[in-house]
Image (cartoon, helix red, strand yellow):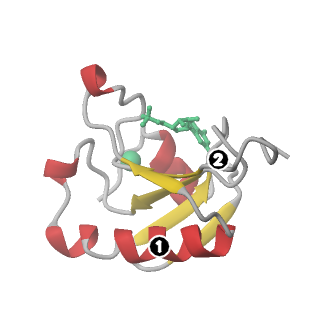
Amino acid sequence: MSSAACIFCKIIKGEIPSFKLFESDKVFAFLDIQPLSRGHALVIPKFHGAKLTDIPDEDLLEILPVAKKIAKASGATDFNILQNNGRIAHQVVDHVHFHMIPKPNEEEGMS
Ligand code: 5GP
Ligand code: ZN
C-alpha cells in the first residue's frame, strides 16, 4: 500500500531522489536530507502508514535488523534509534520512519 501524496512513498518509487542505503521487499533506508550527524539514516517500511500502530507486524519485524546493519556500517559506537508518532511527539512526515542517528564524539562533529 502506498500513498500518492506521501514524500516517503515517492522516495521509495524513485520519484524523489534519495541517497539509498538499503532496499528489500518490505524495507527501504536512505540518508536524512537534514542530518543531525554524519550518517543520519531513515529506515522505513514500504507499506504506507502514518504511525507505528498502522503498520502490520510482519513489515515492522524487518525494520530493526536493517537499522542494526546500518548502525554497524556507519561505524558509530554510540547512536540513537528514534521513532516519532504524531505532531505532539515531533513527527513531521506521516510515513513511519525510524531514525538512526550516530552520536560522534565532540572532536568528530559533522566531519
Ligand atoms: P520526523 O520529525 O517526522 O520524525 O522526521 C522526518 C525526517 O525526514 C526529518 O529528519 C527530515 O530531515 C527528513 N526528511 C524530510 N523530507 C525529506 C526528503 O525529501 N528526503 C530525505 N532524505 N529526508 C527527508
Ligand atoms: Zn508513504
Q: Look at mark 2 in the image and give the residue it sits on.
A: 16
From the viewer's side, name the closer residue of 11 and 84: 84
Real-space Cα separation, disc 1 to disc 2, in angstroms: 25 Å
Where is 25 relative to 83, above or below? below
Residue 56 percent across, percent down from the top left: 16, 65
To which residue does mark 1 refer?
68
Q: Is residue 78 left or right of residue 44?
A: right
**Residue 42 visible in the picture:** yes
- Classed neighbour count for the residue bearing mark 1: other residues with Cα under 10 Å, few (<14), some (14–19), many (≥20): few
Front residue (pair 111, 44): 111
Using the rendered view, name the quadrant where residue 55 is placed.
bottom left
Q: Is residue 103 above or below residue 71?
A: above
Q: Quadrant of ligand 1?
A: top right
Image position of 9 (left or right of 36): left
Above or below, 63 relative to 37: below
Q: Quadrant of residue 2?
A: bottom left
